[in-house]
Image (spheres, grey):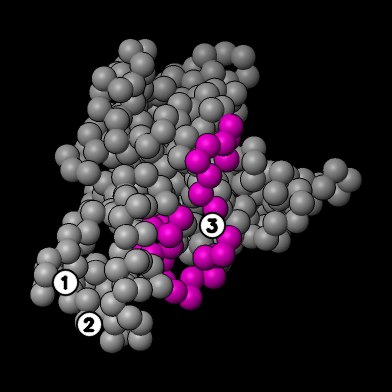
Amino acid sequence: MEERILRMLRRTEGYLSGEAICRELGVSRQTVWNIVEKLRVQGYQIDSAPRRGYRLQSGPRQVVREAVLSYLPEDFPWRDRVTVLPEADSTNTQLKVLAAGGAPEGTVLIARRQTGGRGRMGRDFLSPEGMGVYLSVLLRPECPAGELMHLTCAVAVAMCDAVQDAAGFRPGIKWTNDLVAGGKKLAGILTELGLEAESGAVRYAVAGIGINCRQRAEDFPPELRQRAGSLEMIAHREVDQNRLAAAMISRLQEMAGALQAKKAVTMARYRRDCVTLGREVTFSWEGKVLEGRAEDVDENGALIVALPEGGTVKVASGEVSVRAKNGYL
Ligand code: BTN
């Protein structure tokens, strides 16, 4: 009921009369009033004016399950699998526990803050309350691990789509899995696989995404300020985190359904978004620090780097970090 009232308010310019809501939902005025009060408690700003009705001013600033769901279609297949936690050490860690217990594909965990957010290569991912969306999704791809090499790339493209949907601009991708804009990292992706010990078959994949939304430069620790940014720093407006979370879930569901079938299309889109291509990069490879020019990304997400002395090397994702010669990008 809350969701239906929200949808009605969203599609109405100006005020929506209490009577219209009562008619459409077949409930009393008192019920409508009670629901509006409940929504206000969740953080919705709803004006009410005598004889005019209700008008939605803004949504909750924090992630609220009902608010996320209100942006997803009523028949969205993963609706009942979305959980919002006030706090988690790491949504990836928690989701791996659920995966081991048999949770289905499409189980989504979102935390309003993480106390031990994890990034690639053992790094931390800062996840302060209210500042971003920290979300993990459980996938159960039915294929060998070798056919999932492009998974992180597919998640990155899906997350560019989600940012475009919710924040109105399209970030780039710094190989392999950072979303960037204005020369700064806005988001990171950590994909983890659970394998059957004996056969090596894939039992599950957990894709975790953290998107910085609200930070201003001074909100980042001094050592990150040069490199870290947020959606609001680029969009110059408030970004609705509930809408963003819904866009992320929706784009992930779309991606999961076509992971193999659309591999070539996805990788072509990845190359278009990838800002690393064409740049001079420094990377460590087989114990040496090398420099070269990032030429291409192959169908498995490996970066193909042309070396100054001639020849190319293929750098597999997950193995190394690549830096531009002069700075982060
Ligand atoms: C990176 O920047 O190297 C990857 C960062 C991934 C962060 C997300 S936030 C949700 C999920 N839970 C985690 O602990 N990590 C991922």
Q: Could you say which is closer to the camera, residue 200 or residue 304? A: 200
Can residue 24 be seen? yes
Q: Which mark is residue 20?
A: 2
What residue did someone put label 1 on? 53
Name the element at disc 1: strand
Percent coordinates x, y for residue 74 in the rendering:
44, 74
Q: Residues within 10 Å of mark 1 (few under 14, many from 20)?
A: some
Q: Which residue is mark 3?
A: 82
Q: Give me the residue at 32% from left, 38% from top.
A: 213
2 vs 3, front mark: 2
Q: Earlier in the sequence, mark 2 or mark 1?
A: 2
Magenta span covers which residues?
65-91
Q: Is residue 94 left or right of residue 26?
A: right
Observer-side mark, 1 or 3, equals 1
Q: Quadrant of residue 58?
A: bottom left
Residue at horizontal 18 percent and vertical 56 percent from the top: 57
Residue 178 in the image, given as x and y percentages of width and height: 42, 35
Q: x%, y% of residue 250?
A: 44, 61
Mark 2–mark 3 distance (CA, rounded to whole Å): 31 Å
Tell me, yes or no, whether the highlighted magenta stretch contains residue 30: no
Pick the residue in front: 64 or 150: 64
10 Å crowding of disc 3: few (<14), some (14-19), many (20+): some
Left or right side of 128 for 257: right
User: Residue 284 is drawn in which quadrant?
Assistant: top right
